[in-house]
Amino acid sequence: MSEPLRVAVIGAGHMGADHIQRIDRVVSGARVVAVADPDTGRAKDVVAGIDGVSVHADAMAALDAPDVQAVLIASPGPAHEEVLLAAFARDLPVLCEKPLTPDSAGALRVVEAEAGLGRRLAQVGFMRRYDAEYLRLKSLLDSGRLGRPLMLHCTHRNVSSPPGFTSVMLVNSSVSHEIDAARWLLGQELTAVTVLKPRPSSHAPEGLADPQLVLFETASGALVDVEIFVNSGFGYQVRCEAVCEGGSARIGDEHAMVVTTAEGAYEEVAQDYLVRFAQAYDQEVQAWVDATRQGRVTGPSAWDGYAAAAVAEAGVRAQESGVRTSVELAECPALYL
Ligand code: NAI
């Protein structure tokens, strides 16, 4: 295929706008031809300066715009299922921002619909799988050089939480990235979750349980602990250390610019995910475009999106009950094995 892939983008908020600019300026082999957002003024602002883009208030109108060949979903999670199913009905490949759907029942409906087609159309936006540091860690673990992984220690810190961010969202929104990264790095399902809450930071909004410690158990007996702290106040930090039988490996130490002044020296810290994972998003969207133009679907699957939703739900139950909670997964369709 020599013509660029013609993409409809659903949702023109933070991620949608970022992906639209990315497809326009960074990614090769694709162009945005339609955008849907109920806030059409926002959508028009985002596509100002990009030729040949139609703007729609309704996602279905964007899917049905002339010559659309693929869909990138960046609307809020509750709007994903309807668009995914509509894309499947139109035989359109989809890159869907995480979460696939906010609940595992919705995610399972998406999995079953895709399995019913007998071929993959959806990729889920777990972009850490495209981050250079995560890829090096994955490659090291897969090589077996360090022996069996026993534990992952993960840190996930944001500067501050957006308005309306709840204690539940620390687990089912923020930690969803660690859930997917742990499943992918270790190549196994997460089977149980325990959530512990220290006293909240005095910098957290009233009523927000922040930080929290989330402990996952895996199918072959490894442990994954995640510190999630969304009002750290100082930066966006994502770290992961794998402890294996024959050594350990750590990523996320931010060897960034070192600034030296009369007061001392410090390393700059990224302030948000759009900076820390900029190259991962670029790689993710480029890989999706390349595969789609070749008629292939790669990357995190709808099953990965379902599993992440099911683990996150167990995490929320564990958070509410204060006790270790098992993860219940449906049977994995053959399409994803
Ligand atoms: P946002 O609130 O900045 O933007 C959402 C946009 O979608 C708004 O412009 C809103 O008007 C529009 N919208 C609402 N309902 C819609 C519908 N039914 N159809 C089309 N557009 C609709 O949200 P943000 O941060 O851009 O998040 C969007 C998605 O990206 C979410 O699924 C979120 O979880 C995901 N996300 C992923 C990240 C990652 O690291 N992969 C990071 C941040 C968000």
Image: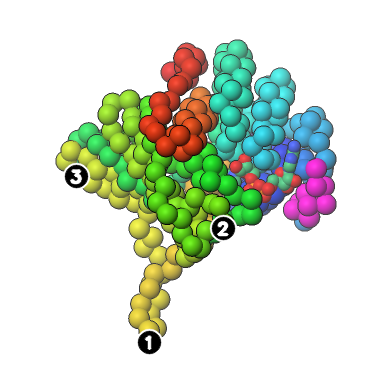
Range of magenta residues: 38-48
Would residue 227 be visible to someone looking at this image? yes
Q: Nearer the viewer, mark 2 or mark 1?
A: 2
Predominant SS along the magenta part? helix
Q: Are marks 2 and 1 in contact (CB under 8 Å)?
A: no
SS at badge 1: loop
Q: Give x and y (percent) for residue 293.
A: 60, 32
Instruction: Using a 10 Å C-alpha cutoff, classify the residue at mark 1 as few (fewer than 14 neighbours), some (14 to 19) or many (20 or more).
Output: few
- In space, the residues marked 2 and 1 are separated at their CA atoms by 35 Å
Q: Residue at x 42, y 37 (%)?
A: 322
Q: Identify the residue under disc 2.
A: 205
Q: In this view of the protein, which residue sits in the foreground, 308 or 209?
A: 209
Q: Give x and y (percent) for residue 239.
A: 38, 51
Q: Quadrant of ligand 1?
A: top right
Q: Residue at x 80, y 43 (%)?
A: 38
Q: Give x and y (percent) for residue 46.
A: 74, 53
Q: What is the quadrant of the N terminus in the image?
A: top right
- In space, the residues marked 2 and 3 are separated at their CA atoms by 40 Å
Q: In this view of the protein, which residue sits in the foreground, 281 or 311?
A: 311
Magenta segment includes 41: yes
* Residue 162 drawn above or below residue 304: below
SS at badge 2: loop
Instruction: Using a 10 Å C-alpha cutoff, classify the residue at mark 3 as few (fewer than 14 neighbours), some (14 to 19) or many (20 or more).
Output: few
Q: Identify the residue under disc 3.
A: 247
